[in-house]
């Protein structure tokens, strides 16, 4: 502690003694602060009153201690009692230290990190027009098509309509694919869709296209929301510590924690089974280890979490051929709940006049051994009455190897809602699958093995081949660049076949790779590929493929620009050729600004940096574009429900300009636009004449403070005026100190317009 601060504390103590001379006896002293055996290297004012100790509440608050739980001193309300209840205080006179033992529940903590919801911002009013044009030419056919999608949005809603044009011989060359209105409810993590849409996928129903109403949860689309059965990895730390999580001996996660209760925010990093260890090591070197079994999978919902969806409307058929082929009315309801971290139950009910379905699903974790999924489904129609389907699967991930098996039985006349009763059902009678995967195997690294079979019912009019196939393969990397793979398959059902493929690849440092493959049936393929993740540039692939006594040459190219992507390929053989040219892009408008850009698949932002041109715009610290002559730039590919930092390079602004902030965090909704404004103020100099309430000028040399004593200080000149520099439009708190130690205050209003000498009355 510096000498100046010590003198201030001594003077404060002497003043306190004088002020309390006639009150209850209170002792004040300087003491070094220790909390939970950790020296904070801080001198504090300690009040001793009888057997009780008090210290400044602000000192405790700075150390994340909840002072609202502590009693306050009757006469000094800014001092908190630290020697009562389960808080222990010992004064060490030899070192002049107060040593506190404070339980962890007094520290600020947040044990609801898994329930935190990322609320996206409301979108600005705007829209986009996506377009996708394709031309194809081959020996036997010439075709072209175009797709246009219009979107208009604001706040949490979006209206979309898409149209397809194709020159093929169909009844309608122009088909309306989709017309829908979406409304997000971020707080409840649900979405309402009116118009054309699809049912939410689940194992108990085939996905259906329909027009009507669709409402339900959508938290599975949020990358930051952990909805699966993540275990509650929580504990407490008395002093700053490091908490590390190991699963099967491998470090999964590490986090520094402050004193108090903690919960590890591991998120999607845990998807494993086995033995887990939490190792806590504090700054003093003390170490504790907690071991427990763990089995985590996103097939299990968190305890108490619900997933649901309701859909009703008319089923749509031939959606890419007919704009208005709406038929049967239907209703579908889906509900799933995590009964515990080890048990999840779900059901789905579907109804139409022709077909009705009901199903139940049960996902169960058995200790940390395996995950078992069971499904029972029933269908009913007037022609076939009741039919059933049963499924059972089990899987286990051991870290270095995983295995699983599944089996499903379906009765002959089982139908899903949306099936045609007049057509023969082609669902397999039996479906079986067994798989095994090994990693980090000596010499070969990775091995995978699987067996699958499908057995169909005999039918005189519609014959399906029974299938049985076994696949085995391995792949190994040699360093960062070279990789080898070998696979073999054997089909021994009604259709007999077998073969193998050898594959080699080599990666160069400049985003180029060479791929070679050779199959047992004398199919040889060699490709040179250049590809990178940048949004602007040129990717290509050239190669040759020899098969069936013919040699085919291919060239593919992708020209990536700011205003869209041009994609082309050409394949040439002895007697065949095939070519295609495609262009994808969009027009977006937002905040009276229009821009041709890449196709809008995600959210985008319109960034304005004053009126400056050629200012670098950054998305999560990565350069994306420069501002135009009006100070605008569009930022694209903002993934929904993910926090992004949108920023600009403030060092490119003139040194005399001032800004309020140079970055802004944004969480967006899909295919929405957001205006992001970074105000830039041209700093002004303002000349003022401060006067007192009698309209008298202040003595030259008086100090004028801007924004209190911590702000800038200007001396008043001999003519009674003072010039202030670097001000931006707004209100400023002004305080004037005279040589006679008198003070007065005023508020200075600075406008954007030019100002003459301003008279400021200080009171």
Image (cartoon, rainbow, N blue to C red):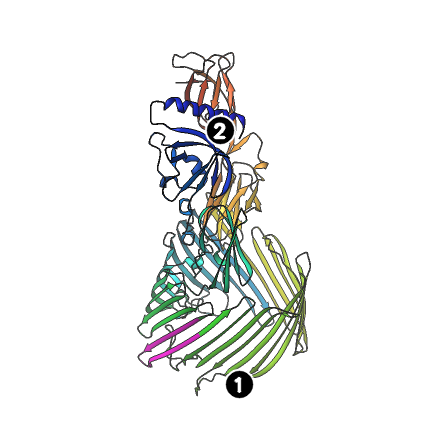
Disc 1 designates what residue? 494
Residue 267 picture location, percent across and down: 48, 56
Q: CA distance from mark 2 to mark 1?
A: 82 Å
**Within the magenta stretch, is there residue 248?**
no
Looking at the image, residue 83 lies above or below residue 763: below
Q: Earlier in the sequence, mark 2 or mark 1?
A: 1
Do we see residue 726 in this rendering?
no
Most common secondary structure along the magenta stretch: strand
- Disc 2 residue crowd, few under 14, some 14–19, many 20+, Cα 10 Å: many
Q: Is residue 643 among what the camera can see?
A: yes
Closest to the observer, 92 or 447:
92
Disc number at residue 728? 2
Residue 440 screen position, x and y as percent: 61, 67
* Label 1 element class: loop
Side of 725 relative to 367 (left or right): right
> What's the magenta region?
372-392
Task: Give the crowd class for mark 1: few <14, some 14-19, many >=20 residues within 10 Å.
Answer: few
């Amino acid at each position: 502690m510096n000498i100046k601060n010590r003198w201030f504390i001594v003077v404060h103590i002497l003043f306190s003694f004088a002020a309390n001379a006639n009150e209850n006896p209170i002792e004040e002293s300087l003491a070094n602060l220790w909390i939970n055996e950790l020296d904070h290297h801080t001198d504090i004012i300690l009040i001793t009153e009888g057997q009780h100790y008090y210290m400044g509440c602000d000192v405790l608050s700075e150390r994340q201690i909840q002072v609202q739980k502590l009693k306050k001193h009757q006469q000094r309300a800014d001092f908190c009692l630290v020697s009562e209840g389960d808080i222990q205080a010992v004064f060490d006179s030899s070192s002049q230290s107060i040593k506190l033992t404070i339980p962890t529940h007094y520290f600020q903590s947040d044990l609801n990190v898994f329930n935190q919801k990322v609320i996206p911002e409301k979108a600005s009013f705007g829209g986009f027009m996506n377009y996708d044009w394709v031309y194809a030419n081959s020996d036997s056919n010439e075709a072209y098509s175009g797709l246009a999608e219009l979107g208009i949005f604001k706040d949490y809603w979006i209206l979309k309509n898409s149209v397809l044009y194709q020159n093929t011989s169909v009844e309608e060359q122009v088909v309306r694919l989709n017309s829908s209105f979406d409304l997000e409810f971020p707080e409840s993590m649900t979405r309402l869709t009116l118009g054309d849409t699809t049912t939410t996928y689940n194992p108990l129903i085939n996905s259906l296209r329909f027009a009507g109403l669709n409402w339900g949860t959508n938290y599975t689309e949020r990358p930051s929301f952990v909805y699966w059965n993540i275990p509650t990895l929580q504990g407490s730390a008395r002093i700053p510590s490091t908490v590390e999580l190991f699963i099967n001996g491998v470090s999964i996660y590490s986090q520094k924690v402050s004193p108090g209760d903690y919960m590890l925010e591991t998120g999607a990093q845990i998807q494993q089974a086995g033995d887990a260890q939490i190792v806590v090591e504090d700054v003093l070197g003390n170490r504790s280890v907690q071991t427990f079994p763990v089995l985590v999978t996103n097939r299990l919902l968190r305890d108490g979490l619900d997933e649901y969806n309701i859909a009703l409307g008319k089923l749509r058929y031939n959606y890419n051929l007919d704009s208005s082929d709406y038929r049967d009315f239907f209703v579908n309801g889906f509900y799933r709940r995590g009964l515990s971290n080890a048990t999840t139950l779900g059901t789905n009910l579907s109804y139409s006049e022709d077909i009705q379905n009901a199903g139940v699903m049960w996902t169960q974790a058995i200790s940390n051994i395996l995950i078992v999924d069971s499904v029972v489904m029933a269908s009913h129609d007037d022609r076939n009455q009741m039919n059933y389907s049963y499924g059972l699967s089990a899987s286990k991930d051991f870290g270095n190897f995983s295995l699983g098996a599944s089996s499903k039985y379906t009765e002959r006349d089982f139908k899903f809602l949306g099936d045609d009763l007049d057509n023969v059902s082609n669902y397999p009678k039996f479906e079986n699958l067994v798989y095994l995967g090994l990693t980090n195997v000596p010499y070969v690294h990775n091995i995978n093995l699987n067996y699958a079979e499908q057995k169909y019912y005999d039918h005189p009019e519609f014959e399906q081949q029974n299938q049985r196939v076994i696949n085995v393969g391995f792949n190994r990397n040699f360093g960062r660049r070279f990789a080898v793979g070998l696979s073999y398959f054997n089909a021994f059902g009604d259709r007999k076949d077998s073969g193998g493929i050898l594959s080699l690849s080599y990666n160069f440092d400049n985003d180029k790779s060479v791929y070679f493959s050779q199959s047992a049936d004398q199919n040889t393929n060699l490709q040179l590929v250049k590809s990178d993740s940048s949004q602007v540039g040129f990717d290509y692939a050239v190669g040759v493929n020899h098969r069936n006594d013919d040699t085919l040459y291919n060239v593919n190219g992708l020209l990536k620009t700011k205003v869209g992507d041009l994609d082309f390929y050409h394949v040439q053989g002895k007697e065949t050729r095939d070519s295609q040219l495609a262009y994808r892009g969009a027009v977006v408008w937002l905040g009276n600004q229009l821009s041709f850009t890449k196709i809008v698949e995600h959210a985008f932002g319109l960034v304005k940096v004053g009126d400056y041109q050629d200012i670098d715009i950054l998305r999560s610290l990565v350069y994306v574009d420069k501002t135009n002559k009006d100070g605008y730039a569009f930022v694209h590919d903002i993934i929904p429900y993910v926090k992004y930092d949108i920023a600009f390079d403030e060092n490119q602004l003139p040194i005399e300009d001032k800004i309020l902030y140079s970055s802004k965090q944004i969480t967006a909704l899909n295919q929405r636009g957001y205006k992001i404004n970074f105000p830039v103020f041209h700093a002004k100099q303002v000349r003022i004449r401060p006067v007192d309430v009698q309209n008298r000028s202040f003595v030259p040399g008086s100090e004028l403070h801007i924004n209190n004593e911590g702000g800038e200080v200007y001396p008043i000149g001999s003519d009674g005026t003072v010039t202030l520099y670097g001000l931006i439009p707004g209100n400023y708190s002004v305080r004037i100190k005279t040589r006679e130690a008198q003070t007065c205050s005023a508020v200075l209003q600075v406008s954007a317009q030019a100002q003459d000498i301003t008279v400021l009355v200080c009171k």
